[in-house]
Amino acid sequence: MNKFRLAYLIFGSFLLLYLFLYNPKQPSTNFQSYISNFNPEKTIVGRFILAPINIKFIVPPKEKYYCGDREIDKKDFDLCMKYSLHKMGIRKMKDAGKLIHYLNLQRPHEMPQIIDSNHGHRIRLMRAETYFLLICFFVLLWFYRFKATEGLRNFYKKI
């Protein structure tokens, strides 16, 4: 029975580490650099559980609109985007008044950008949630080791 408990703890530990900490895009050559550059949005639990909850309820996106390096409002951002598409030859602007108004807003090589100002807060929160949940599940794994192995043994006896 002790072998079953040990196998349960080892298998459960590897499964928890895989779900909470494994990131296929991040190189795992050095442990210190892996932890310092850890991105919880790319893990399995972060992608499917933590990110949707954090984006919708806890830390919603707060978008800031930029035309080059200047912060502008949504209306001017739409003009900035239209002019950028006009300048690249993708979509021509038909309203000359908007074009003249926009030439006052934009410098020659500025591109429009939308930046989420809450992204850094969300990453820090997700990192803390990941570590907290990982520790909680390790504690649950440890406390339920007897019940789980007894349940497995009873299941195999019935078969």
Image (cartoon, rainbow, N blue to C red):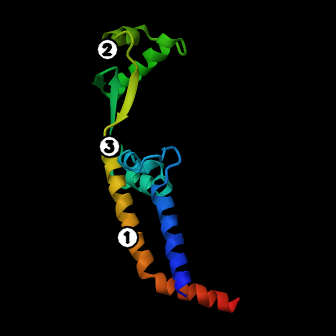
| Whole-number angstrom distance, CA of label 2 to CA of label 1 | 52 Å
Tag in front: 2 or 1: 1
Q: In the image, what residue type sits under mark 3? A: Gly
Q: Is residue 23 left or right of residue 99?
A: right
Q: Please, is residue 12 above or below residue 121 in the view?
A: below
- Regarding residue 93, the answer to whether it shows in the image is no
Of residues 105 and 150, the one nearer the viewer is 150
Residue found at x 35% / y 53%: 127
Q: Where is mark 3, residue-wise?
A: 120
Q: In the image, what residue type sits under mark 1? A: Cys
Q: Is residue 124 left or right of residue 52?
A: left
Residue found at x 43% / y 47%: 30
| Whole-number angstrom distance, CA of label 2 to CA of label 3 | 29 Å
Q: Is residue 137 left or right of residue 7?
A: left
Quadrant including the C terminus: bottom right
The percent position of residue 152, horizontal first and vertical second, equals 59, 84
Q: Secondary structure at mark 1?
A: helix
Q: Please, is residue 142 above or below residue 91 in the view?
A: below
Q: Please, is residue 59 above or below residue 112 in the view?
A: below
Q: In the image, what residue type sits under mark 2? A: Leu
Residue 82 is drawn in which quadrant? top left
Q: Where is mark 1, residue-wise?
A: 136
| Whole-number angstrom distance, CA of label 3 to CA of label 1 | 24 Å
Q: Which mark is residue 20?
A: none
Mark 2 touches mark 1? (CB < 8 Å)? no
Q: Where is mark 2, residue-wise?
A: 105
Residue found at x 68% / y 91%: 158
Q: Residues within 10 Å of mark 3 (few under 14, many from 20)?
A: few
The percent position of residue 49, horizontal first and vertical second, equals 46, 58
